[in-house]
Image: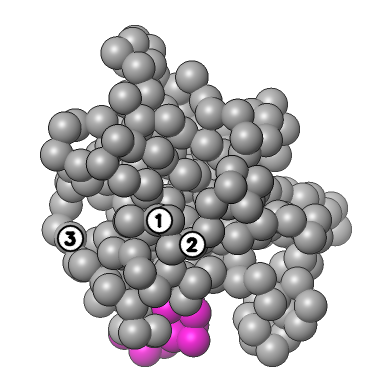
Amino acid sequence: MPALHPLCCGRLRFDRSVFFPDASPGTRTTVPVPGFLVIHPKGKLLFDTGVACEAAADPVAVLGQRLATTFQMVGAPDENVPGQLAHLGLVPDDIRYVANSHLHFDHCGCNPLFGRSTFLIQRAEMQAAQTPGGRYDARLWQHPLDYQLIDGEHDVFGDGTVLLVPTPGHTAGHQSLVVQVARDSRFVLTADACYSSEHMARELLPSVVWQGDQMLDSMRRLRAMGEQAGSQILYGHDPIQWAALGAARQSLS
Ligand SMILES: [Zn+2]
Ligand SMILES: [Zn+2]
């Protein structure tokens, strides 16, 4: 069975109304940028690569004025992908697969470090990112990497323990990850298909939505998966849940 490690790949501070459109502006919130390492007998998979390391020192140069104005980088020096992998005695070349939930800046920022990995991305997401005028920045994902485009559900290691599941709505080709860590225990990693338990409880859509009906449908499917026996949902940017998870060195069970 695979082991699952939470990696803190940055922290973002911003106005709460970005996540909760019904909140009045003026209150700041800080959320984690999670990545997850899956250690499977057939290889290691990294789910999301967080914010680019260089953004901490010069956010405007790396992310552009719009994002750098909205989001303040407040992660500790080791809260990025290479820093977190180092805590486990690993380097990027040890990672066989990288799966990006989607191609927003806080989910693909460290992609260029993984020149020896195969990237698993939904075809619909890559097509959306390549379409001009969206919320994607080509500088963050348009690198000579081994992008393998997938269509729909994908069983990464062929044994059903690590499944990529399409959850469109936040973006056109968003995907979530389901990891079976024991016969009676599995984790459903929503990524940005649902930011937090509060969003799930209120069926609240954030301000960044590609298609609201599809996002709601994806949230409901994720909730149903989380309600199955032995299942636990891990939300995309939930500071309360994240604080309870512990550090990268410990795997989740
Ligand atoms: Zn996003
Ligand atoms: Zn995000």
Dividing the picture into quadrants, the one containing residue 145 is bottom left
Residue at mark 1 to residue at mark 3: CA–CA distance: 19 Å
Label 2 Cα neighbours within 10 Å, binned few <14 / some 14-19 / many ≥20:
many
Report the residue marked by disc 1.
Answer: 95
Q: Is residue 167 visible?
A: no
Label 3 near label 2: C-beta < 8 Å?
no
In the displayed structure, does residue 82 sit left or right of residue 103? Answer: right
The residue where tag 2 is placed is 92
- Magenta-highlighted residues: 131-141
| Whether residue 94 is situated above or below residue 193 in the rendered picture | below
Residue 160 at x, y percent in the picture? 19, 31
Q: Is residue 176 shown left or right of residue 234?
A: left
Q: Is residue 132 magenta?
A: yes
Q: Disc 2 residue type?
A: Pro
| Residue 192 placement, left or right of 77 | left
- Above or below — where is 16 with respect to 92? above
Q: Which mark is residue 150?
A: 3
| Residue nearer the viewer, 121 or 211 | 121
**Residue type beneath disc 3:** Ile
Nearer mark to the viewer, of 2 and 3: 2
